[in-house]
Image (cartoon, grey):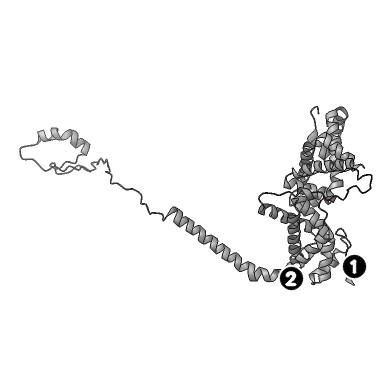
Amino acid sequence: MLGSTFPTSLHDDTHMCVLIASCLMGDEAAHAHLFQIASPHIYRLAYSILLNRQDAEDATQEAFVYAFRNLANFDPQRGTLRTWLYTIVVSRCRNARRRKWLPTVDLGNLLLMGREPSTSEEHSPAHQAAWASAREVLQQALTRLSPRLREAIALRYGHDLTYREMAEVLNCPQKTAESRVRLAHEALRAAMTAEDAALVQEMLSI
Amino acid sequence: MSEHIDHLLTAYIHQQLSPALKTQVAHHLQRCDHCRAALDQELSIGRELRDWMPAIGKPNKEQLTVLWSSVRQDRRHGLSWRWADGFPFTLIAMGLFIVVIACMVIFVQGPLPAIAAPVSPQQIQVTWTPYLTERPTDSSVQLISSEVAVTSIPTLLSTLPASPAPIAILNR
């Protein structure tokens, strides 16, 4: 009955208060719905920061457990539920990094290829080799970024947050968020040679 | 603006420059091949990030199903765990930590001896020059300083009669 008024995505702020109210009343279906619409975003953010599947799953689990326990503390006047959840998961990712002193980068799973070639023509060995090279270039460039810069890039480009929302999530001034994106751009530009950039550009234009 | 402006390009693309600086950057880009190439690369990186970042770490359905069951289990048993297990465990861990630190201090360094500050007797030299405030009525009593006494005693003794009169010498 309530399901029809639940938001269909994490960006649907108009119906979010109904879902939150149902969660606060202890409705199991509301919790499940909130997890269903938010978990892909939360996991993707955790993964793009930690670059490790197991760590990302742990951070996602911890973030949801914390969010469900502290949902009563969420104040819609201070921001959206989306940025509140992002704040929690970024905090959990930072904790995970502190716990794991030496970072382990799961290079094999870094890019889950939503843009993998699908036609038989594109499955040609030459094309697959070129695609693998392009993927490798971006893998290497992204893994060289510091975690703080990767956070900024993930929020800006992976989740399309504004600088003001980024500042809220990262708990820093807006100018700092802008600087981190700029520094990440400069680091990526320095890490990728002109040939690398041309190769990636060519693959993306296919 | 004759030097290269690579550091301003991201801000230029994201419309974060002041109008005056933006105009200067635009003029510079018309003249400088190096910065124009850097701008092209910057735009390319932005496009690539927008295309690729949303594809990074997309979870599959099985992953989320397993995660949801873990979250649901944690949510149901979280409160009892926190107070039944977590809280005493934290206290015990803190107690053990304090005991280990105390043992390290005692056994590694040993008991700290109470060392008193060394004190050796020293002679105190006090120089005191008494002032004769009132001339003694008894002429046989003279108050003289130690300095005067050292220099004047031989002279004084030579002036004394055979039966010496009492002399008070204040040496201190």
Q: Residues within 10 Å of mark 1 (few under 14, many from 20)?
A: few
Q: Residue at x 53, y 60 (%)?
A: B98
What range is drawn magenta here?
Answer: A111-117
The correct choice, above or below, for A99 with respect to A142 in the image is below
In the rendered view, does A31 fall on the left or right side of B136? right
Q: Which mark is residue A188?
A: none
Q: Nearer the viewer, residue A199 or A7?
A: A199
Residue A24, given in percent of the width and then of the height, sits at 79, 69
Q: Is residue B8 visible?
A: yes
Q: Nearer the viewer, mark 2 or mark 1?
A: 2
The amino acid sitting under disc 1 is Thr
The answer to which of A74 and A144 lies nearer the viewer is A144
Above/below status of A29 relative to A111: below
Left or right of residue B164: residue B92:
right
Q: Say if labels 2 and 1 share a chain.
A: no
SS state under label 2: helix
Q: Main secondary structure of the magenta part?
A: loop
Residue A81 in the image: state x and y as whole percent: 81, 60
Name the residue located 76 percent from the left edge and 39 percent from the top edge. A187
| In the displayed structure image, the side of residue B155 where residue B42 appears, left or right | right
Q: Which mark is residue A5?
A: 1
Q: Quadrant of residue B46?
A: top right
User: Mark 2 highlights which residue?
Assistant: B76
